[in-house]
Image (cartoon, rainbow, N blue to C red):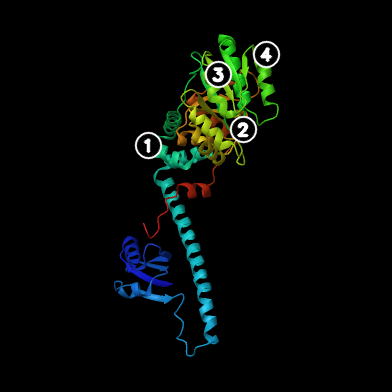
Amino acid sequence: MRIVRQVAPNSRQALRAIRELLGENAVILSSRRIAEGVEVTAGADVDEAQWAASQAGLAPVTDAAPAAAPATAAGPAAAPTALATPVASDAVGQELKSLRQMLESQLAHLAWNDLTRRQPVHAELLRELTEIGLARDLAERIAEQLPEGSDLAQARRFALAALAQYLTVTGERWAEEGGRLAFIGTTGVGKTTSLAKFAVRWTLRHGPRELALVAADSARIGAHEELHALGQLLGAAVYTPSRFADLPTLLTELSHFRLVLVDTPGASPRDAKFAERLSVLAGSASQLESVLVLAASTQAAALEEIVQRFAPAHPSCALLTKLDEAATLGGAISVLIRAQLRLGYVSEGQRVPEDLRPARALDLVSRAVALARQSGASADEDLLRRRFGKVAHVGS
């Protein structure tokens, strides 16, 4: 490891000179103001040949790992030194990594404090967007687009409008013309319940004659019986394919129905038939729309994984369930916006069909804000520094 001390009129010139000598991986060890300007000390692992050929004018202070003295005799006595070299190198590497993390943390701290001083409205808006659970990149995008001179009230209104604009919804597109919908998603998110709510809504408006239910969930015990019971209650036709792969053929036979609702098996990571079902759904895209059912109570990271896993089915929209069980809605909103997945309906509670309604972007965003306030959500300073502190190191 080579450590150097550089004196320059200002920090920028000192850092530039250090980078030229030590490379992009240099780590700042200390800095202070002196009569000549600033004094910056930095260290890095460098190639000795490159060091010898580098520009003059940066005086080396010391070597953290000085070269070993030449061996005076061959044989076993030289072995301990050879064995110790990798260990010392690993220790230096760990120390450099720790120093870099400390430096980046300090720079993030300074950058966030500077932002709160220069642009207090932006900083407060970032805080409030974090408190509703919004993803960091979306919060930064909204803050960057904030009109100049906005006060906090204007900034809040702008943020709500921007989020509502980013979150696209389908509207109640199947209520009148019908369609062919497959409810897909993981186990327990409410696919069958959502299908039942949708079927009842249709029956109350149009009657059951042009409605067909397809019980394609052969994985869950009692799933077929549930759908047949619903069909008897509504007076609607129920069909059960012998295999999931027979779904495209069955859909062709049901072309005279205005609305066809398909219940599919819930997927788990260990489901060997999951990829096969996705392939069938993707192959039926011309005659069947997939509706990805997501639970609002699921953590954002898990929702992102679910969206990625079901992407091969090319879902046309999402249905968000369990709003009444969600502690925050910012994560779900972030996932939908990032995936550019339109939201069709939202659902909460068990009432059929009252607890299913078309999604309204501004309503959902407003509810996310209200939920954060009700729960007393708060973002501490350390979290905000890590999220929004612009990390600038010597390699910048």
Quadrant (top left, top right, bottom left, bottom right) of the C terminus: bottom left
Query: Quick check: marks 3 and 2 in contact, CB under 8 Å?
Result: no
In the shown orientation, is residue 58 left or right of residue 276?
left
Query: Quick check: marks 1 and 3 in contact, CB under 8 Å?
Result: no
- Would you name the residue on which mark 3 appears? 260
Quadrant (top left, top right, bottom left, bottom right) of the N terminus: bottom left
Query: Quick check: marks 4 and 2 in contact, CB under 8 Å?
Result: no
Spot occupied by residue 115 in the image (x, y as percentages of width and height): 41, 47
Residue at the limit of the structure toward the bottom, as seen here: 73
Say above or below: 382 vs 202.
below
Identify which amino acid the numbered label 1 is placed on: Gln
Near mark 4 (Cα within 10 A), the count class, few <14, some 14-19 or many ≥20, is few
Near mark 1 (Cα within 10 A), the count class, few <14, some 14-19 or many ≥20, is few
- Would you name the residue on which mark 4 appears? 233
Identify which amino acid the numbered label 2 is placed on: Gly
Query: Quick check: marks 4 and 1 in contact, CB under 8 Å?
Result: no
Q: Which secondary structure, mark 2?
A: loop
Identify which amino acid the numbered label 4 is placed on: Leu
The quadrant holding residue 325 is top right
Spot occupied by residue 243 in the image (x, y as percentages of width and height): 61, 28
- In the image, which is nearer the foreground, mark 1 or mark 3? 3
Label number found at residue 145:
1
- Would you name the residue on which mark 2 appears? 266
Spot occupied by residue 173 in the image (x, y as percentages of width and height): 48, 18
